[in-house]
Image (cartoon, rainbow, N blue to C red):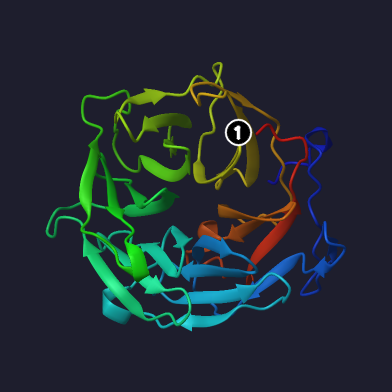
């Protein structure tokens, strides 16, 4: 059962009826679709990456990458499934002219041209080690960081000039740190700001802070609250948005200046949030991927897959 909208957050969910779309006024006065359609019946999308007016969404079932424009309601296939071993696409980010895709259980990171979809590089994180699940990507300075939900390792690689990338390295080993891995999935979404990474542990709902200069790992004090089932993270200044997939919520966390503490605000939900996994920011809007992971069984055929837009709250701390 979905929870009612919570108006105190000042976030208004957009109602979507059937295949129709609702226009949302933007800061520039233009109108953009309130829902974006993704072609395909069994793609179960997860990751989203936005650069300018262009955004990308990936299929977890075959690795197809779709490309859309925030001004147009329909996405189109961009990079074919299976290319160079890309049989799934999880978290992703755009870095300059590169689209970086976490490859889940393949243990690989795929670097694509954001213009053509061609594969520029495939990075393999210790071939043969299992279980492994490369989950999400964050960009900070000249480096890309990738979480692994099964192995207690944070990977990173350098973003070189001209679209080149450096070798992947085991940047932080969480063994023995404040970030204790348990059975099943652990590290999921990741965000970056000024040399500080924030990572969510999905089953516990804890947030962790990683200083890229010192490699110090600490739990963020949420005052006894959690963001359980946290998936994708989106950071905008000190405002952190958490997609809580199974709960069909997007929850804001106001971080302290040093990123060591956070205040969890009331979440927003609605029928357009179909098991949201990751989010991106388009002006004053948040774009949420509807994965429909709860309908993967044959007994529950999914609805058309979409990316939904909701209004982002104002008054963020910078």
Residue 72 on image: x %, y %: 72, 77
Between 169 and 5, the residue placed more toward the observer is 169
Q: Residue at x 45, y 82 (%)?
A: 116
Q: Residue 161 lies in what quarter of the image?
A: bottom left
Q: Secondary structure at mark 1?
A: loop
Q: Is residue 193 above or below residue 298?
A: above
Q: Residue at x 45, y 61 (%)?
A: 95
Instruction: Give the percent coordinates (x, y) of residue 41.
Output: 54, 78
Residue 151: name its quadrant. top left
Observer-nearest of 187 and 220: 220
Q: Residue furthest front?
A: 161
- Residue highlighted by disc 1: 238
In the rendered image, is residue 43 in sight? yes
Residue that appears at 77% across and 69% down: 33
- Check the image and name the residue furthest to the top: 223
Q: Looking at the image, which residue sits at the far left?
A: 128
Q: Position of residue 165 (x, y in %)?
A: 29, 63
Rendering coords of residue 314 (x, y %): 78, 40
């Amino acid at each position: 059962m979905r929870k009612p909208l919570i108006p105190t957050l000042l976030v208004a969910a957009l109602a979507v009826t059937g295949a129709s779309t609702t226009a949302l006024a933007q800061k520039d006065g233009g109108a953009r679709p309130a829902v974006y359609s993704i072609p395909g019946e069994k793609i179960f999308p997860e990751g989203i990456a936005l650069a300018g007016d262009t955004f990308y969404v990936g299929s977890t079932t075959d690795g197809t990458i779709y490309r859309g424009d925030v001004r147009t309601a329909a996405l189109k296939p961009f990079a074919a499934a299976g290319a160079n071993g890309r049989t799934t696409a999880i978290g992703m980010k755009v870095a300059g002219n590169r689209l970086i895709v976490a490859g889940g259980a393949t243990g690989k990171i795929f670097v694509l041209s954001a213009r053509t979809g061609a594969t520029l590089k495939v990075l393999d994180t210790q071939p043969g080690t299992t279980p492994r699940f490369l989950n999400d990507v964050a960009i900070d300075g000249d480096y890309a960081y990738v979480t692994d939900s099964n192995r207690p390792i944070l990977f990173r690689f350098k973003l070189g000039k001209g679209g080149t990338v450096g070798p992947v390295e085991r940047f932080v080993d969480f063994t023995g740190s404040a970030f204790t891995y348990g059975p099943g999935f652990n590290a999921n979404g990741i965000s970056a700001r000024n040399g500080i990474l924030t990572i969510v542990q999905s089953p516990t709902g804890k947030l962790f802070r990683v200083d890229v200069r010192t490699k110090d790992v600490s739990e963020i004090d949420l005052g006894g609250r959690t963001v359980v089932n946290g998936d994708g993270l989106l950071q905008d200044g000190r405002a952190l948005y958490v997609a809580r997939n199974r709960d069909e919520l997007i929850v804001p966390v106001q971080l302290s200046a040093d990123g060591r503490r956070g205040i969890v605000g009331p979440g927003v939900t609605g029928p357009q949030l179909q098991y949201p996994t990751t989010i991106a920011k388009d002006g004053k809007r948040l774009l949420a991927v509807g994965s429909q992971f709860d309908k993967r069984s044959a007994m529950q055929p999914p609805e058309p897959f979409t990316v939904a837009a909701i209004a982002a709250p104002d008054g963020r701390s910078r």
